Image (spheres, rainbow, N blue to C red):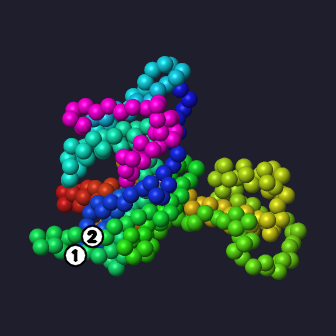
Amino acid sequence: MEQIQFRLLTAREIECRIAQIKEKGVQLLLYKDARTDMALLDETVGPMNWQRHHSRDNANCIISIWDSEKGCWVDKEDVGTESNTEAAKGLASDSFKRAGTNWGIGRELYTAPFIWIQPPNCKIETNRNGKLVCYDSFEVSEIGYNDHREISRLVIVNAKTNAVVFQRGTAPTPTKAEQSKAEPKAEPKASTTAPATEIQKKLIVEKASNEHYMEIMQRYGASLENLTKDEADEVIGEIEDRNAANPAPVVCERCQSYITGVVLPDGSTMTGGEIVGKSKLTYGGVYCWKCMKELKRASNKRKAG
């Protein structure tokens, strides 16, 4: 069997679910519908080349894909959890979606950023039982991915108001054809043939990813010495745009998990970048919020002892 790679999910194939509600806002999670898994299996391997089986009263699901080279079915299995409504049906659906994730369908959703929506972008109420509720619904209007199949751009709107309530990452750079249609023709700038400065060359080498650096070398004759000062300025701007759209994930030095934003007890939030800055300043290293709390507890114990 050739390696199977399911395409990345589009914005219309991704759903938003409220994971938790607090007085200061709501947290959203991204998920996929079971019909999306069915559609991508049909699209990628063909409707006659996959099958599903459930066991343990729908708790487990196996998705099998036919390997024509080996002449056998290849299985991947996972377990689901019951939903609040229609428990049996929800359990079957969840185990099926999780088995689909084992095959790679929608696995990119695990790279989603921490999504926190605050009023007035959402309406939080207290029901008759004194419980906080939010009846707003949210939709993914835009999504983009980097070369590692990680989410690099995400825009979420309130389905009732159609207002943008969450935005992360930058929009894709328009093509030259799109730019020429959208922008009036400007007077040509006076160009210079002065060579790129040493500072410009250093910035390009330090900031460009290996893959992007090779693209630049191919474009300008395999040497930075061929760059003019104007061309170097253009390349540096391109590098900064690409790095902003595809920021490198930061890993905690202690637990090796990705550092993401958190909601504080007072309802305010801290981004992953803010947590990294605080950990460097306080503990001299790069730590996630959970590990910082553990380090603080350990420090307090030492002081008390």
How many numbered marks appear? 2
> Disc 2 on helix, strand or loop?
loop
User: Residue 81 occupies which quadrant of the picture?
Assistant: top left
User: As shown in the figure, which amino acid type bears the numbered disc 1?
Assistant: Glu
Please determine whether, in this image, residue 97 is positioned above or below residue 145.
above
Residue sitting farthest toward the left:
129
Instruction: Please say if 39 is above or below 300.
Output: above
Give the left or right position of residue 277, taking residue 245 as reference: left
Under circle 1, the secondary element is strand
Q: Position of residue 102 (x, y in %)?
A: 40, 38
287, 10: nearer the viewer: 10
Residue at horizontal 66 percent and vertical 61 percent from the top: 239
- Type of amino acid at the residue the image marks with label 2: Tyr
**Is residue 44 part of the magenta span, yes or no?**
yes
* Residue 175 at x, y percent in the picture: 70, 63
Front one among 303 and 44: 44
Residue reaching furthest to the front: 48
Q: Which mark is residue 135?
A: 2
Can residue 278 be seen? no
| Tag 1 residue | 125
Q: Which residues are magenta?
A: 31-59
Residue 282 in the magenta stretch? The answer is: no
For the point 36% across and 43% down, the residue is 97
- Horizontal arrangement in the rendering, residue 304 relative to residue 199 (left or right): left
Q: Quadrant of residue 162?
A: bottom left
Tell me which residue sits at (82%, 80%) in the image: 187
- Who's the residue at 24% across and 44% down the image? 89
Residue 107's disc number: none
